[in-house]
Amino acid sequence: MDASSRGSASAAHPRRFLRDGLGFFGTFLKSPLSVGAVLPSSRYLARALVGRLELQPGELVVEYGPGTGPMTAVIRERLPKGARYLGIELEPRFHQLLVRRYPTLDFHLGSAEDVAAILAARGLPRPQRIVSGLPFASLAEPAQQAVVSGIVGCLRGTPGDFRTFQYLHAYGWKTARRFRAMMAERFDGFERVGPIVRNVPPAFVLRYWGAK
């Protein structure tokens, strides 16, 4: 890439972030419980959440709630050759954007609660990693339970892990504590990273493994 191309790419990134932010905020106003944030996650949070993708050819990473794709961009950068990706997005507007923005990746328009049926319909194996941008602290208890049961069903008996994040200001909410208690009952291993203070708002990364 020459200097002029790098300049164009650098200029395009802030414009994309602003455009995504405005679109994200508009969707939040229409459906705050399904989006759960007013801005897309920053690259700092995305990098901390995705980490290293130590996948083998044919193995799968699933992303819940990609939104406008900040985590997806990092996953695409780090996806090993021969490994596979599937994003599950409930919001049609975001799904359309993701399909256009990442034409080499696969996306499903639907709910993460149905992950087992989605994987079976696509002939995909159980994932080795699930990365989530879902607003668990904003979800009602039945939805939390349904999504968590799907995660456990995917990861039980595998060395895989699940990663999500919770905003610092919401970490003490009753719904956020309920989610963490639910996960503690269903997983042997837990790690908390952060807070990632360069995200707006700051957030903790939560990692779980050893599904029971």
Image (spheres, helix red, strand yellow):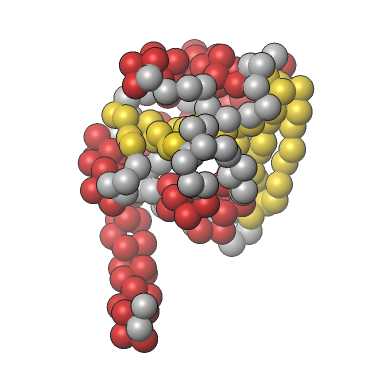
Q: Is residue 181 above or below residue 50?
A: above
Q: Is residue 188 above or below residue 32?
A: above
Examine the image and state in which quarter residue 9 appears.
bottom left
Picture coordinates of residue 179, whole percent (x, y): 61, 24
Examine the image and state in which quarter residue 122 appears.
top left
Given residues 34 and 190, the one toward you in this image is 190
**How many numbered circles are shown?**
0
The reply to whether residue 80 is in sight is yes
Examine the image and state in which quarter residue 211 appears.
top right
Q: Residue at x 28, y 38 (%)?
A: 95
Q: Residue at x 51, y 37 (%)?
A: 57
Picture coordinates of residue 81, whole percent (x, y): 48, 46
| Residue situated furthest bottom in the rendering | 3
Q: Is residue 180 above or below residue 163?
A: above
Picture coordinates of residue 61, whole percent (x, y): 50, 35
Picture coordinates of residue 44, whole percent (x, y): 56, 58
> Considering the image in quadrants, where does the C terminus appear?
top right
The reply to whether residue 27 is in sight is no
Residue 134 placement, left or right of 88: right
Residue 8 placement, left or right of 86: left
Given residues 8 and 124, the one toward you in this image is 124
Given residues 136 and 161, the one toward you in this image is 161
Residue 114 placement, left or right of 146: left
Given residues 72 and 142, the one toward you in this image is 72
> Considering the image in quadrants, where does the N terminus appear?
bottom left
Q: Residue at x 71, y 47 (%)?
A: 193
Q: Is residue 75 above or below residue 153?
A: below
Q: Residue at x 53, y 27 (%)?
A: 127
